[in-house]
Amino acid sequence: MTPEEKFTFDLEGYLVVKNVLDAAAVDELNGLADEIFPRNYDENNYCRAAPVSRWGARFRDLIDPAALGPYMLELLGPKFRIDHDYCIFMQKGAHRGGLHGGPQGGVYPEADHWYRYHDGTMRNGLTVVTYCLSPARRGDGGFGCIPGTHKSNFVHHIPAAVRNFSRPAHYVCQPEVEAGDVIIFTEALVHGTMPWNAAYERRALLYKYSPGHSAWDQNYYELDDYPGATERQKRIMAPPAVGGRPDSVQDGD
């Protein structure tokens, strides 16, 4: 991470990394998704499926993209692991849920949602890498958040009307992205899925990571489901552990 990226993440709790996927990769992933993923939209024009990492080698490899390894090391430490993954597809008019999360889970104080800084080092609990396979321009909707709330002491005072997007608030932000960009955010940030207003389909792949000692999801990755996985990918998919867990990234990878 650059010094400016560290400043931005510490300040706002999220970061947009531009052009992680080039146009050819976006086209390939979208084409594969069209072949693999049946669109069973609900009454809210919203569709979700998990895990997308089993959709084949291209989706498996998103577990460990070379461009994002340094971010995971900086934000989660040397033993980071992938916790779970899924996709969100939305059509115009889609709406689902509201703003949630926040330090220590917001309304769920037992949750693994936290952000810490000490002596030059940032660390986070559950952290999300969102691959944007479609753009989200101003007013389109999709990922939204309240920047800086990963360090807020008053998230319980956010009005319900703001949380469910029925009342606009100047402090709610919808980052603009292009297809191929990635949004990285800590779950300690108050965030959610804003109603989708664009004429084109929203397509987002969410890969969620934890420090090596913790887990959010009760299910772990089965390596038999990932033939061809590299040794590094296997380490990243390993179950949580404190003692004896190897570093996720090693010399010679």
Image: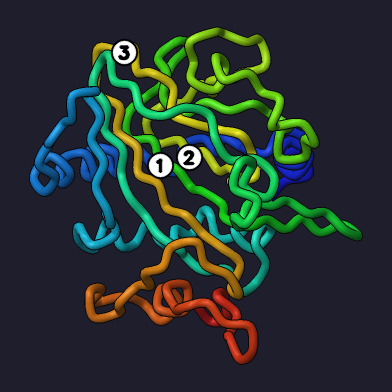
One can see residue 251 in this view: no
Rounded to the nearest angstrom, the CA distance separating label 2 from label 3 is 19 Å
Residue 230 locus on image (x, y percent):
36, 77
Residue that badge 1 annotates = 131
Residue 137 versus residue 39 in the image, above or below: above
Callout in the foreground (3, 1): 3
Q: Residue at x 25, y 12 (%)?
A: 199
Relative depth, front residue between 122 and 156: 156
Q: Earlier in the sequence, mark 2 or mark 1?
A: 1
Disc 2 residue type?
Answer: Val
Q: Earlier in the sequence, mark 2 or mark 3?
A: 2
Residue 229 locus on image (x, y percent):
31, 75
Residue farthest bottom in this picture: 244
Query: Which mark identifies residue 176?
Result: none
Q: Residue at x 29, y 59 (%)?
A: 53
How busy is the neighbourhood of tag 2: few (under 14 within 10 Å), some, or many (20 plus)?
A: many
Left or right, 57 with reference to 113: left
Residue that badge 3 annotates = 198
Asked if labels 1 and 2 touch by Cβ distance under 8 angstroms, the answer is yes
